[in-house]
Image (tube, helix red, strand yellow):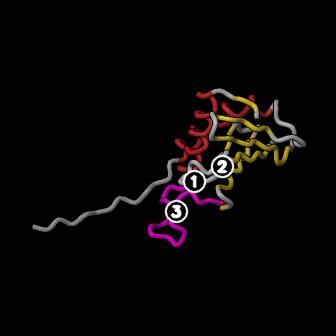
Amino acid sequence: MTTDVVRKRYQFDLAAMQRIAALNYAALQPWLEELDADQPWELSLGPQLRFTVRLMQQAPFTTAIRIQQHRFSQQLPGLKEAQLDVRLYHDARLAEVVACQGVSQLQARYEIPNPQMFHVNEKHQVNLFLRDWIQLIRTHGLQEV
């Protein structure tokens, strides 16, 4: 007996994306007061992991920041250092990842398969990843390096 499988096409959920962007904005907003364009903000999460938050650009309605994850030593060989560029839109009160690992202009939906091996919902995934980073930093507390 054979069964035909009908694959449902991925539909971008704008409302879900805006919810995540609003939550990320609310979580990042307090950090903006402490960021200085001349001095990056370095945070340590335990003995092995460090984050750098850098103010990249500030304008009346937007702010761009870069969050980088670093490791202190080679004791975590599988851990890749990651970088997210985030734009905060103050009028809309939203924060969006505009580049991840140097890849910018992420599309809302990708066809599968694709040459870059992106997930069908790559843009949504990197914004969830930002949310996870923010939660990690807030949960474990901030220790300036």
Q: Do the residues labelled 2 and 1 touch (CB within 8 Å)?
A: yes
Residue drawn where x is 66% and y is 61% of the image: 103
Q: In which quarter of the image is residue 100?
A: bottom right
Query: Regarding mark 1 in the picture, which secondary structure is present there?
Result: helix
Label 1 CA crowd tier, 10 Å (few <14, some 14–19, many 20+): many
First to last magenta residue range: 104-124
Q: Which of 92 and 121 is in front in this view?
A: 121
- Looking at the image, is mark 2 or mark 3 earlier in the sequence? 2
- Badge 2 is on which residue? 97
* Prevailing secondary structure of the magenta residues: loop
**Residue 31 drawn in magenta:** no
Q: Can residue 22 be seen in this view?
A: no
- Residue 118: numbered disc: 3
In the rendered view, tell whether residue 2 sits above or below residue 97. Answer: below
Q: State the image coordinates of residue 136 (x, y, percent, origin top left).
A: 59, 34
4 sits to left or right of 29: left
- Residue 81: numbered disc: none
- Residue 123: numbered disc: 1
